[in-house]
Image (cartoon, helix red, strand yellow):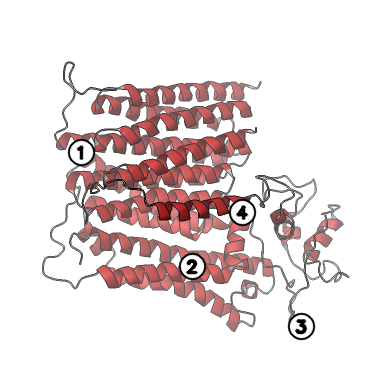
Amino acid sequence: MTAVILIDTFLLILVTITAVAIIEVRNLYASAMLTSVYSLLMALVWVNMHSMDVAFTEAAVGGGISTILLIGTLVHTAREEKPQKSRVHWKAAAVTALCGAALIYGTFDMPRFGDPKAPIHHYRVPEMMAQTVGFINGTPGKQKPPEGFDHTEYRSFNNTVADVPADPTDTAWRERSLMAQHGIILPKVNGHAPAHVEPGHTHPPDDFNGHVPNSVTSLLAAYRGYDTMFETTVIFTAGVSLIMLLRRPRREGYLQRSAPLVDQTILRVVGKMSIPFILLFGLYVITHGELGPGGGFQGGVAVACAFILFALIFGRPALYRVLPPPVSDLLTGLGVLVYSGTGAACLLLGGQFLDYSMLDLASPGDGEALGMTLVEYGVGITVSMVMLTIFNQLAEEQST
Amino acid sequence: MQWNHIVTTVFLALGCVVSLTGSYGLLRMPDFYTRLHTAGKTDSLGQVLIFLGLVFVTPDWLTQCKLIMVALILMIAAPTATHAITKAAHLHDLRPWTKGDPGGEP
Amino acid sequence: MSWVYLATAVALLIGIAIILVRAIVGPTVYDRILATNAIGTKTIVFVTLLGYISGRTEFIDMAIVYALVSFITTIAILKFAEKGRLD
């Protein structure tokens, strides 16, 4: 029993206890706070599995924003659940038990936790690792290169590298030949046939990854760029639907009855001090998402939290003076526009939609990195403004 | 054992002891204000000790700066949150428990 | 050295489990708010320690962001408990 499995088991026991407590506790306020605890424990489970981006998003969204929005819904409803006669519904229990048993039976076929022979370690990931940094078993950036290794020469895609490979399925041939010149030999991985290459464009046909060390971000933003674009559109649609459902036309004095916390000195001073810091750190997380854990979603949530803190301490009228609703509505759409605009720019520059390597023809890997930065900014803008919109709509005292 | 490993071990052990004592106090104290006393104080101190202990073992200076930054943030934010909780409880007429009152269960 | 990190992480986990009891049982609502805040702080420290156990030090970014976000969540919960609205 390794330490990882012990910690995992213990955390999952705590998660189960919390989940049962969320259902059993009748006070809705307590349930909302236990939901935050549940999200925190799940974030710890993800951290234990070394999936940092997932843990980051779970902690920021589940432990932060979701709890605030759940409290926001508590404003509109009662504090306690009505007592119900506990009567077990046998048909529903049977269906649930059958589904659960089927799911557990399905997991018998999956590879064991931490198995090095799992399929995920053999198809795409070694190629990506070879394309980004190229060190064997390398956590990108964490291993020291051998002596005499020149990073700039390694990362520059000049055409004098080596000749075209004999094997058309070898997609990492540039890096492999340059590293072979330095005496570093990588294990050969099985690629697949390259797509059609434009004549005159020296872009390696399947080098989607670019020079981005964080493989999660490069997978999300480049390899599955369409998915992420539509996810951003889904978030945008959620914000739009909330506006359509909950926003009432302005009437006289609707913002007068707010309850700011300005009379509490300590809270006001500490909040004022931390708001610019949180904004700056959110921007850092969005930009640094390529090099470490982070990205557009997590940074957008941090930026939204800064605005929410401002609204909590100084009241929503002050927030509407700083960031009027027309501006925040406009910015929700602007993020999606930035994302699809980057794709369209690549289309107009002669490549395919969302083929970021067109942005920098001299060095396609750097073009990919630039494209990923731009789309992460788009995602960050949309996510932050939509979270702020949801908070604003839920914090109005009277809804429909 | 190098000297920074020994220093880190001492700091981590102190931080652990402080945190565990605070958690146990949160479980056993009879009243909300006493629980606040234990949990709020020991929380802030424990995490500062652990983060300062980890500073000595980190290889690069950027992570050291970030660790000190987290410790500073938590040192400012955690007591503020504790103060806000106390003020909210006091404004809602939650009175401290004195010995002999009923209902002071651990 | 890694056993020191592991022992600290286990101690923090035990601390989280004890506080969870208070979060579920706690008679008043402020007990639960206090317990949630304490679990948040211990999670931040635990995440950093897991980073040191596995040898990667990039986890500190998540700790910073989560420290700020949990502070804001506590303020939101308290504002609702005190004033009854989130404005």
Q: Which residue is identified by label 2?
A: A231
Label 2: how many Cα within 10 Å (few below 14, some 14–19, many 20+): some
Label 3: how many Cα within 10 Å (few below 14, some 14–19, many 20+): few
- Write down the chain letter for disc 3: A
Can residue A331 be seen by looking at this rendering? Answer: yes
Q: Is residue A196 left or right of residue A70?
A: right
Answer whether labels 2 and 1 touch (C-beta < 8 Å).
Answer: no
Q: Which residue is identified by label 1?
A: B88
Q: Which residue is identified by label 4?
A: A106
Where in the figure is residue A194, as x and y percent of width and height? 76, 73
Can residue C49 be seen by looking at this rendering? Answer: no
**Callouts 2 and 3 on one subunit:** yes
Label 1: how many Cα within 10 Å (few below 14, some 14–19, many 20+): some
Answer whether labels 2 and 3 touch (C-beta < 8 Å).
Answer: no
**Callouts 3 and 4 on one subunit:** yes
Label 4: how many Cα within 10 Å (few below 14, some 14–19, many 20+): few
Element assignment for label 1:
helix
